Image (cartoon, rainbow, N blue to C red):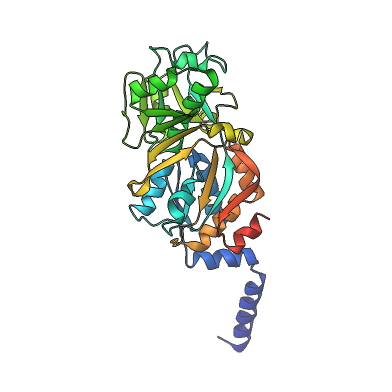
Amino acid sequence: MSENLKKLAIIAIIVIAVTITPIVYLQLTILSYEKTLIIFHAGSLTGYVEDLSEIMEKNYPGLEVLNEPSGSVDVIRKVIDLKKPVDIMMVADYRLIPDLMFSSGKAKWVLVFAANEIVIAFTDKSKYANEINTENWLEILMRPDVRFGFSDPNKDPCGYRAILVLGLASLYYKTQEPLEVLKESADVKYSTDQGKIIFDVSEGIFPDSVRIFTRDKSVDLIALLEAGIIDYAFEYKNVAVSKGLKFVKLPKEINLGDPSYSDWYSKVSIKILAAGNVVKTIEGAFTSYGLTIPVEPQHPTIARKFVELLLSDGGRSTLEKNGFKSLSKPIILGSAPDWLKELVK
């Protein structure tokens, strides 16, 4: 190669180097080391996580996002009990992370980023589909010929929230019937103390009965609904919306969706078998979702980029498009890194 050609080649390399944008350079740097992102998440977050994953894979060519949905209690078990590698953990009840992971040293912080509420989902095949409404939903669910379902309360927060909702309905409507149906049909034990109801499913419940059916996570009940095996299912509102299901909105005193009713929601609680075979008591509370990057993530840099996307305007609009309520300001609990504190200022 002549000296002139060598000089031209060097000049071309310099021009290319200085014209690469900082974003592209950052993408190339990240992907030279981290080409995989592993996310364990609640089943109700599936559509939202898939949408964010698609954006991530477009922003970082060559990146593969591996999503693994399950009940939120199982999300924690995968890390604590099974010691599976993960980068991002997203649960439907943010309290699971500080309660079950902080003390074990597996996580140091949780970001509360979204809210939801419980609804009663159904289809045209459901018995009394033309009758059920916000006023009579409990009376219809209690009819002997109606079958309904919720997820396993020892695996999925939607399951224990369904039981808490029935407990609140018992208090709100002043009837013992939902408590007795839970006990007889699903072996859900309960006791009362000074106007409060304490459920106990730590020894397990019946998986299926004539009236009540359970599955590992709430989204698994949809196939039973569509097949007509059950008439109604306790679901998160975003799941009902995203799946095109009909649903009944419950009163704010019952749906676990209004933070102003926190004191009232706490009148019901439930004992579950959590990660590490520890019996954990969970009080009724406003339905809010949490996220963390565990202490030893497999791919820390790209995990951080995922959180940045989630907290961006685009991430917020994607959240709302998937039927969730966005928080006016996300909440951080625990010892969060400085970069996260800056993002939520």
Residue at x-position 61% and y-position 83%: 5
Write the residue at 62% across / 74% down: 17
Q: Is residue 256 left or right of residue 179?
A: right
Question: Which residue: 64% across, 57% down?
Answer: 343
* Residue 130, image x, y percentages: 52, 11
Q: Is residue 218 above or below residue 42?
A: above
- How many tags in the picture? 0
Residue 231 at what x, y percent from top left?
A: 42, 18
Q: Residue at x 61, y 88 (%)?
A: 3
Res 214 seen here: yes
Residue farthest to the front?
194
Corner quadrant of residue 43: top left
Residue 70: quarter of image: top left
Image quadrant containing the C terminus: bottom right
Rendering coords of residue 35 (x, y %): 46, 61
Quadrant where the N terminus is found in the figure: bottom right
Residue 229 x, y percent position in the rendering: 36, 20
Residue placed most toward the observer, 139 or 203: 203
Position of 259 with respect to 244 (left or right) is: right
Is residue 134 or residue 163 the one in the foreground? 163
Is residue 247 in view from this perspective?
A: no
